Image (cartoon, rainbow, N blue to C red):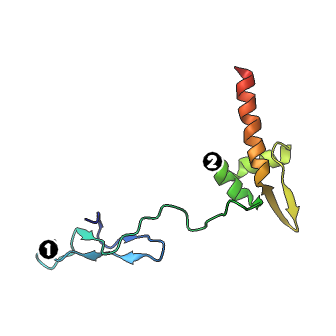
Amino acid sequence: MPKPIPAGMYRATRAAAVKATPDPALSCDGRRASTVIVQEETPVTEPFTTTTNDQLLVTPEEAARRLSVGRTTIYELMSSGELQSVNIGRSRRVPVSSLSSFVSRLIGDVVVER
């Protein structure tokens, strides 16, 4: 049985947003129904912009998302030299291998401090 969502709301699907339609059994006097049943429901389990595992370079925003930090933190790490990055034209990109080695260094620092 589909989950009810508030009237007039949309549920995102991978193909497209599906307009939620009111269940006729729930509206009894012609007023707007307080609950609706979604006719088609497809759970969205991953972001709409998918990245492949064979990607060599990512944007600073994608690097921030992968490390669960803010974009400003990524730019600070790049300017301090802790996180390697490359210029391609006027764009700045972070090698995925640089992200992995950065995390490995962080894990190594934690082990040494104990």
Residue 112 or residue 24, whichever sits in front? 112
Give the vertical position of 70 relative to 11 (above or below).
above
User: Circle 2: is it few (<14), some (14-19), or many (20+) Cα within 10 Å?
Assistant: few
The spot of residue 104 in percent (x, y) is 74, 38
Badge 1 vs badge 2, beta-carbon distance below 8 Å: no
- In this rendering, position of residue 62 left or right of residue 41: right
- The amino acid type of the residue labelled 2 equals Ser
Q: Hey, which quadrant is residue 77 in on the image? A: top right
Residue topped by disc 2: 68
Identify the disc placed on residue 25.
1
Residue 33 or residue 25, whichever sits in front? 25
The spot of residue 97 in percent (x, y) is 78, 50
Q: Can residue 57 be seen? A: yes
Q: Residue furthest bottom?
A: 30
Question: Looking at the image, which residue is at 29% across and 63% down?
Answer: 3
Question: Looking at the image, which residue is at 34% across and 74% down?
Answer: 40
